[in-house]
Image (cartoon, rainbow, N blue to C red):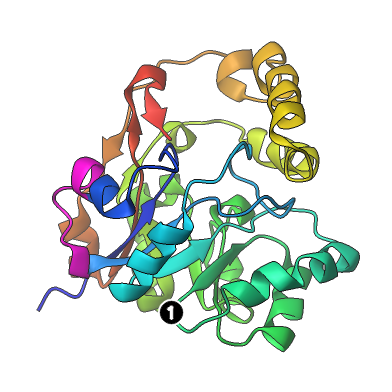
Amino acid sequence: MDNTVYTISARGKKLKQPVKEYFETYFPNIPLHKIDSIFGFIEPTSLYSGRPFLRRQISEKDYQFLQENNIGLRIPFTNHYVSEKEYLKYKPLLQKYHKKGNSLIITNDDFVKWVRKDFPLYKIEASILKEIDSIDKINTAFELYDTIVLPMNVNNNTKLLERIDQKHRITLFGNAGCALTCPNRICYDYISKRNKVLGNSNLVTRSIYYYYSFILRRKWCMHKIQPRKLHGIKDFDIDKYYEMGFTRFKMLREHSGRKTGY
């Protein structure tokens, strides 16, 4: 029996678009019962990373639909930099979604320890931003995290994948964007720092700061510094990884204009 499950990216989703319609439009080949969770922005907070925070993507109505259909909410609190003071500030937000079936994607190990103590119902996944790309790193991360997202390029390292003991705790990318071929993912740290401002600003200030930090400035992305040919979204052979013992897959929505994923 095929027990694969998928976590779906809400990147690029408009807030007013119902999540059911979003699934049907951009991921029509994945049955609803196979969707384990969706990840994207909820309320404003400086805990995000991975993408610059501009506005919410998953609405309250979306969340209600997820709950009614046993689909988890995965919150990308992936910022590299989280102080205890900041954690305390956002405890009410953590409390709001503290429910079995929901999960957090985290990069900062101290943040994980605080959450474990106060919010034990959350499953915690190690973010791709941690760049866990060796057996030693995987085994160390297993001591703190429930599951791990491996970098996209690790999908091509069959020998490493075969050596992983607890494959059921690994999330592999089912498809991949620009990070697959990026020689130096400098954007990760840059976005973490800029989201400290974006997550604490009103929409007008946020938009101005975003324009200055991500449109006018170019040295935050390796493709802007050293352009390379991008090929859009690459689909991986999920059946191949399933036969190896992997069952958890992360799916991105294609951004055709930028030749990558959202």
Residue extending furthest right? 85
Q: Residue 71: x percent and y percent?
A: 34, 70
Where is 220 relative to 150, above or below? Answer: above
Where is 94 relative to 249, above or below? Answer: below
Q: Who's the residue at 62% across and 24% down the image?
A: 221
Left or right, 137 with reference to 73: right
The magenta-colored residue range is 24-33
Q: Badge 1: few (under 14), some or many (20 or more) residues near its Cα, within 10 Å?
A: some
Q: Who's the residue at 71% across and 52% down the image?
A: 45
The secondary element bearing badge 1 is classed as loop
The foreground one among 168 and 99 is 99
The foreground one among 243 and 117 is 117
Left or right, 175 with reference to 140: left
Where is 172 relative to 191, above or below? Answer: below
Q: Is residue 124 visible?
A: yes
Q: Who's the residue at 21% across and 41% down the image?
A: 25
Q: Is residue 25 magenta?
A: yes
Q: Residue 195: x percent and y percent?
A: 73, 41
Left or right, 196 with reference to 191: right
Q: Residue 170: x percent and y percent?
A: 42, 69
In the picture, residue 242 is in which quadrant? bottom left
Q: Mark 1 — residue?
A: 101
User: Looking at numbered disc 1 in the image, what kind of residue is underneath it?
Assistant: Gly
